[in-house]
Image: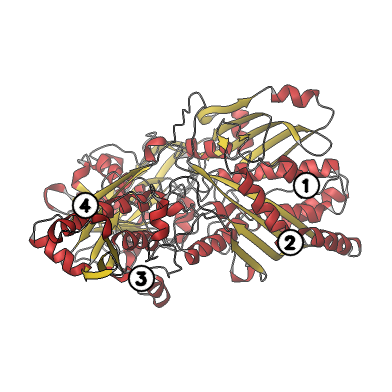
């Protein structure tokens, strides 16, 4: 049987279309009824202890002089107190660089850093005992933001750049140029289920860890590293997460290690669950950026050269900042051709919690910078911002990115934008907005249509691989396991549809099981929007190995040509005649000692990024989309309302249109929160002040646009050989609401055409009001 990616005709001719149908999420009913089991819902074993991290609540930076934990040890319910000296292996929980200690030893590098942990008979006792610690620290001045780190010259990673031509000189020599800068804020993940792990000790020092993580193999590695165990002695399992959004890609390891260390020291099961405030204080966010832009262009707005400086706050350690900042650079062109370009990135170290992966992984920041540049040119030239965007759009298959990768679907990108331009009535509404603003002195409307071009693949080459394990049982039922994790996005359902499709069985015959490092080893994180791409192909390959065995057996036993055999809806057909049920074929094969189990493996082809020389192809393909947003602002209060949103998004041949629409809608609202309401605030001492829903404002149901129109682009299918020619949909939609930010900019611009507002992201009411006041004074960005 051919690979599902190698024979499009076979896919089209299949009678049974389990894949590509709108089926509900496999846990939808359980989510609604509350029956979905998360880690805190697992029945607690006898003797369970609770681990809670203790942290110094004073300075954000300083040398640890002394730590008196006697009162903590003697507190009621306390069984053990853990610190760095209790770790038998390596005191590190970092994803790569070795710079994230499980426990601080000699110095405090951010407010909220874990110094010790309490193991107690109940969680409340552990938390109360943590307050009794006496820690003396010699404080020093913290470095808290990009500007301070820039002055101090401290980074977590070396600077990096893409260079094409002599962009700086071209901008300097041009008679038509623009220069501006703006701030891009971070974002808290605010997953509904916080960080949590439960470790169960076994024989010979073995551990079984339930962890809410996107990367079970990394948790396995870090637990084993800290406890000086072989990775084979640690099993990590996760059935589902209550949200993750990148926050559980690298930063679940610390809490799993604390639970595992507690189990190791006490010999009893241990659970570690953070409360919301501590979770927000102790875990990383989306990187915030200071961005400086300059460009030269023609009278029609077409670019000649672009210079971008993307300076980010990485926090106290590297974490995943290398890939995140690289991806910001990869997406600093968004959908636009830069004839000459210089894209520079500096990764600054600060005494704040280490920032980490967040949906889009740096791409949103780079893309927002590109769109800010389009708006700046529009203000300077007086052109419609959409016309500036169209003038610079990648064309056909001629485009080349600043990092040298061809853009092969420019025609798709153009078609999406022009189709949405018509369906959203952009030109007519532009006139209506202008007429409204001319007659409304206080309330102002804004309109913007922005594209999305997002690269799909891990830019760290070795992560582009996946494994799967598929069993067919004697009754014809199928058990499915793969390395992907389910965080609400519907990955398990999509991959189950692939398994049903490939084996020819109905979806109810496929049993989804928890992701488990003992079943599929050495897994990549469920990230980079590649979960369905990688795991769907791995499962399809495993299914086809089993199916090939079954069809060959049937052909040999019954003397028919293997080409004439097909399986559809649990029935095996020889030609057009029903031969037997799938169950009967499986039972016959079992009796004949035919293997009914297989592993599957997939490695993404064609990608070959050479980071050192900044050459090659970091992505297999690009996902595209566009959105048009209309907003209304109050220039007296800064209040803003999104009045209408139109979205057209390319998912290739969708694996599940209902789930894809859900991802687009949810991603849009989450991205809108990042750009409009979700403001992170640290005080001058490095303490996070927005660490609860009372002070940190995520979008609510009332913030979802009442007029919200989402359509899937009528794609001819992914030109690359992905699973059924689908395209990834996890991260790209988060960047669609950049049109909301640009529409707010458009509304403020109407107060003084030709002047770019001093608007920062998020465009909160305060930020809008500031931009309004400044533009009224004649001061632009």
Identified at 39% across, 48% down, the residue is 5
Residue under label 1: 387
Left or right: residue 503 compared with residue 188: left
The secondary structure type at the circle numbered 4 is: strand
Q: In this rendering, does residue 327 appear at all? A: yes
As measured in the structure, the alpha-carbon distance from the residue carrying label 1 to the one carrying label 4 is: 54 Å
Q: Nearer the viewer, mark 1 or mark 2?
A: 1
Query: Which image quadrant for residue 309?
Result: top right
Left or right: residue 196 compared with residue 391: left
Which of the image's four quarters has the C terminus?
Answer: top right
Of the numbered discs 1 and 2, the one sitting upstream in the chain is: 1
* Tag 1–tag 3 contact (CB < 8 Å): no
* Tag 1–tag 4 contact (CB < 8 Å): no
* Tag 4–tag 2 contact (CB < 8 Å): no
> Which numbered marker is on residue 316?
none
Q: Position of residue 547 (x, y in %)?
A: 24, 56
**As rendered, which of 612 and 770 lies closer to the eye?**
612
Q: Nearer the viewer, mark 3 or mark 4?
A: 4
* Tag 3–tag 4 contact (CB < 8 Å): no
Residue under label 2: 630
> Which numbered marker is on residue 36?
3
Badge 1 crowding class, 10 Å Cα cut-off, few under 14, some 14 to 19, many 20 or more, is some
Residue under label 4: 598
* Tag 3–tag 2 contact (CB < 8 Å): no
Q: Position of residue 85 (x, y in %)?
A: 27, 39
As measured in the structure, the alpha-carbon distance from the residue carrying label 4 to the one carrying label 2 is: 52 Å
Of the numbered discs 3 and 4, the one sitting upstream in the chain is: 3
């Amino acid at each position: 049987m051919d690979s599902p990616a190698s024979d499009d005709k076979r896919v089209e001719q299949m009678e049974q279309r389990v894949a590509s149908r709108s089926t509900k999420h496999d846990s939808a009913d359980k989510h609604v009824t509350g029956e979905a089991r998360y880690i805190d819902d697992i029945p607690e074993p006898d003797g369970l202890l609770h681990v809670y991290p203790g942290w110094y609540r004073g300075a954000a930076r300083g040398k640890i002089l002394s730590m008196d934990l006697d009162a903590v040890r003697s507190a009621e319910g306390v069984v053990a107190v853990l610190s760095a000296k209790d770790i038998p292996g390596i005191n590190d929980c970092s994803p790569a660089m070795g710079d994230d200690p499980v426990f601080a030893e000699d110095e405090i590098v951010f407010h909220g850093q874990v110094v010790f942990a309490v193991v107690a008979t109940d969680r409340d006792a552990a938390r109360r005992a943590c307050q009794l610690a006496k820690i003396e620290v010699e404080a020093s001045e913290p470095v808290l933001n990009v500007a301070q780190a820039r002055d101090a010259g401290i980074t977590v990673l070396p600077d990096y750049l893409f260079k094409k031509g002599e962009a700086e000189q071209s901008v300097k020599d041009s008679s038509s140029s623009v220069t501006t800068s703006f701030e891009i804020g971070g974002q808290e993940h605010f997953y509904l289920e916080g960080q949590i792990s439960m470790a169960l000790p076994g024989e010979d020092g073995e551990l079984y860890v339930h962890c809410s993580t996107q990367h079970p193999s990394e948790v396995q590695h870090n637990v084993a590293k800290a406890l000086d165990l072989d990775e084979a002695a640690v099993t990590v399992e996760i059935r589902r997460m209550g949200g993750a959004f990148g926050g559980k890609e690298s930063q679940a390891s610390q809490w799993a290690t604390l639970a595992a260390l507690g189990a190791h020291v006490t010999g009893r099961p241990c659970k570690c669950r953070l409360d919301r405030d501590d979770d927000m204080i102790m875990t990383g966010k989306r990187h915030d950026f200071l961005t400086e832009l300059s460009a030269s262009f023609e009278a029609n707005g077409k670019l000649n050269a672009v210079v971008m400086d993307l300076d980010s706050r990485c926090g106290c350690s590297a974490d995943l900042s290398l890939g995140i900042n690289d991806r910001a650079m990869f997406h600093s062109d968004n959908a636009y051709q830069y004839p000459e370009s210089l894209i520079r990135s500096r990764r600054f170290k600060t005494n704040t919690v280490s920032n980490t992966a967040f949906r889009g992984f740096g791409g949103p920041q780079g893309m927002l910078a590109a769109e800010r540049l389009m708006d700046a040119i529009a203000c300077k030239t007086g052109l419609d911002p959409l016309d500036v965007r169209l003038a610079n759009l990648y064309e056909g298959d001629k485009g080349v990115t600043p990092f040298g990768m061809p853009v092969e679907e420019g025609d798709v990108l153009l078609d999406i934008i022009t189709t949405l331009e018509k369906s959203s009535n952009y030109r007519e509404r532009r006139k209506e907005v202008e007429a409204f603003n001319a007659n409304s002195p206080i309330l102002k409307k804004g309109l913007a249509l922005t594209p999305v071009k997002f690269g799909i693949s891990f830019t760290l080459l070795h992560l582009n691989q996946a494994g799967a394990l598929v069993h067919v049982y004697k009754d014809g039922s199928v058990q499915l396991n793969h390395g992907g994790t389910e965080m609400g996005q519907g990955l398990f359902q999509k991959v189950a549809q692939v398994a049903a499709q490939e084996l020819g069985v109905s979806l109810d015959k496929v049993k989804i099981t928890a992701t488990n490092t003992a079943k599929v080893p050495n897994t990549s994180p469920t990230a980079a929007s590649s979960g369905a791409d990688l795991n769907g192909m791995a499962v399809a390959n495993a299914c086809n190995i089993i199916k090939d065995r079954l069809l060959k057996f049937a052909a040999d036993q019954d003397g028919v040509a293997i080409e004439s055999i097909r399986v559809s809806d649990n029935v095996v057909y020889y030609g057009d005649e029903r031969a037997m049920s799938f169950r009967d074929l499986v039972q016959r094969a079992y009796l004949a000692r035919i293997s009914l189990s297989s592993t599957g493996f997939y490695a993404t082809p064609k990608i070959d990024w050479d980071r050192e020389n900044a050459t090659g192809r970091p992505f297999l393909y690009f996902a595209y989309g566009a959105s048009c947003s209309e907003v209304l602002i109050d220039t007296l209060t800064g209040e803003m309302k999104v009045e209408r949103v139109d979205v057209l998004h390319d998912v290739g041949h969708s694996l599940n249109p209902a789930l894809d629409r859900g991802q687009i809608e949810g991603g849009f609202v989450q991205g809108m929160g990042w750009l409009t309401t979700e403001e992170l605030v640290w005080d001058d001492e490095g303490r996070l002040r927005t660490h609860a829903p009372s002070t940190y404002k995520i979008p609510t149901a009332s913030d979802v646009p009442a007029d919200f129109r989402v359509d899937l682009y009528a794609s001819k299918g992914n030109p690359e050989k992905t699973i059924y020619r689908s395209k990834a949909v996890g991260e790209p939609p988060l960047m669609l609401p950049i049109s909301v930010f640009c529409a707010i900019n458009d509304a403020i611009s109407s107060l003084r055409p030709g002047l770019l507002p001093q608007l920062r992201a998020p465009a909160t009411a305060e930020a809008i009001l500031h931009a309004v006041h400044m533009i009224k004074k004649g001061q632009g960005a």
